[in-house]
Image (cartoon, rainbow, N blue to C red):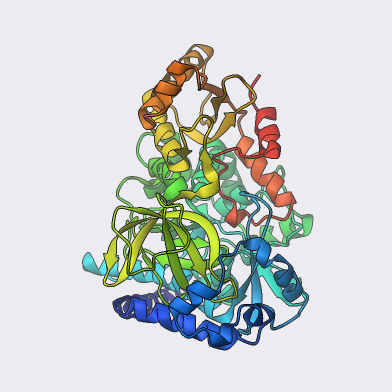
Amino acid sequence: MTDIKGYVLAAFGGFLGVCEHVKLNIYSRRAWKMQETNVRRLMRKNKSTVYGKKYRFKDIKNVEDYQKTVPLSTYSDYDEYVWRMAEGEKGLITNMFVRRFTESSGSTGKSKLVPLSYWAEWVAQCYGFSAPVGCAVKYFLKEGRLLPPQKGLLTAETSCRKLKGGTVSCLSSIPLLNLKPLVPFFATSPKEVLFPEQSADMDMHYLKLRFSLINTKTSYLGTIFITTLESMFFYMEENWEMLCDDIEKGIINDSIKMPEELRKKLSKKLKPMPERAEELRAEFRKGFDFSPIIPRIWPKVEWLYGMGTGALSLYAKKLRRYIGEEMPIHYLGYTATEAFMAVPIELNSFEYVMLPQNGFYEFRPIDSPDYDNLLTIKDLEPGKEYELILTNMSGFYRYRIEDIVKCTGYYHKSPKITFCYRLNQIANISGEKISQMAFDEMVDNLSEYMDDLYIGYSIYPDRSTSPGHYVLLLETASPVNDEKKEKYNVAFEKMLCKGNVSVEPLIKSGALGHPEVKFLRHGTYDDYREVLRKRGANLNQVKPIKVIDNDEKRDFFFSHVEE
């Protein structure tokens, strides 16, 4: 019966996903008309709001009027309105129905609360859940077979809290929250693990692996950020003996943190499985470099989804060690707390098609300081980078999201883009201006050159020395001996000079100091995630800390440097 339900659910989810691709095909053919329609719709619906009256929405008839009349904005322009909405007040920045608010992680600054209109929520549901399955359907059809039953390992931890004006969660949680009753049919983890109490202190890597490893029919892997999945598999590599022992005995290990009542409840779902434990041990004993481990322990896993481009591309490459080079990945798309903006239309694609129905988009070429003559989706030039200015469907108008994207081409009349970096994540000591994406490439090359696997890295532009210099902080998968550590400074300087042509002349002239490498204690990045979790951050939204840009981050990471 479970298999039948699995087939039915996979078929239905796949059908909905393919429908979303058909719709996007139609929308993208008339992308500019949809953009114009969105502006007129927003002005008409929201002209009676406080914000609409302030900027005379009733007098705005077209895109040109909109750009001339409504100023660019940042989050501070909406902060007061949003918190009043959270208290239940209506008609401030939007008249659209809002029942949910999304929340940023706080990993790139102060946490932000953003309203989510019914329109934007539906788009997030369609393209956050159905569309990836639609891509998988098309992938399998090309191979001449149907999408198999879908029951997978999900890393998402979905929780929400209630305010007077609605519930608060992260944008990536919305699809799972809306499908909560169906979770047992497509996820290996129990609901109690995927929807934990906010205050619960739980070892999530263990619990999700504990229930997934016993399921030989696991058929996909799902995550929000690739980093979480890669971190989970590294945990598995470190703790497989404990996991196998517990599977053999049918228990949850006593060392695992979790509420006692939940331990008793989940323990009832488990039974001793000595045969499965021995199957797993046999594969784990062969080692993790013998061949990719995931196809060996879950032979039915055939695809995965998760954000793995831009700043996360380094982790996507690291994940290949576990999943192999052949497994297709759906890279989810380009999203922010404020909106779901672009999606890939096939597996293994790093190009995202912008969703013309979910907002109005403007672009500033990064080589232009001018915000007076912004471009629109019909004006982009493939190969060029732009700052994106977003008008979403939830009450943010001409909002400077501070993301840099590159246009890679067009899908019919809608741009295809890749995310590059955030404006506030460019490191600069003496005019060299090194982007996060450039650091990703440098560290990737350094990893290959030094033959070390990294759990994570962070860059600190240290301006306290004279001259200022870059400090690379690394958490390595295996210990690095003192002799090898001494070689790292030279190797990193080599990568830095190779990655940015301005660096070597600046070092030679004395305007920039020699870079140095420091090594972090094992578990540092997990510790930082725990700090954010205790502050109330949703771990699904926590991004890797690549550039240390404030004193708090600096103090934390330098306190974790190995003696």
Image spot of residue 66 (x, y percent): 50, 77
Q: Is residue 527 above or below residue 351?
A: above
* Residue 341 visible in the shown view: yes
Image spot of residue 294 (x, y percent): 41, 47
Question: Residue, x 39% and y 25% (percent of image)?
Answer: 497
Image spot of residue 124 (x, y percent): 50, 72
- The answer to whether 179 appears left or right of 145 in the picture is right
Q: Is residue 110 above or below residue 21?
A: above
Foreground pick, 15 / 294: 15
Q: Quadrant of residue 419?
A: bottom left
Q: Which residue sits furthest top?
A: 483
Label total for image: 0
Question: Residue, x 57% and y 31% (percent of image)?
Answer: 461
Q: Is residue 317 above or below residue 393?
A: above
Q: Quadrant of the C terminus?
A: top right
Question: Residue, x 36% and y 34% (percent of image)?
Answer: 290
- The answer to whether 30 appears left or right of 436 in the picture is left
Foreground pick, 464 / 20: 464
Image spot of residue 106 (x, y percent): 66, 52
Question: Residue, x 29% and y 59% (percent of image)?
Answer: 381
Foreground pick, 345 / 94: 94
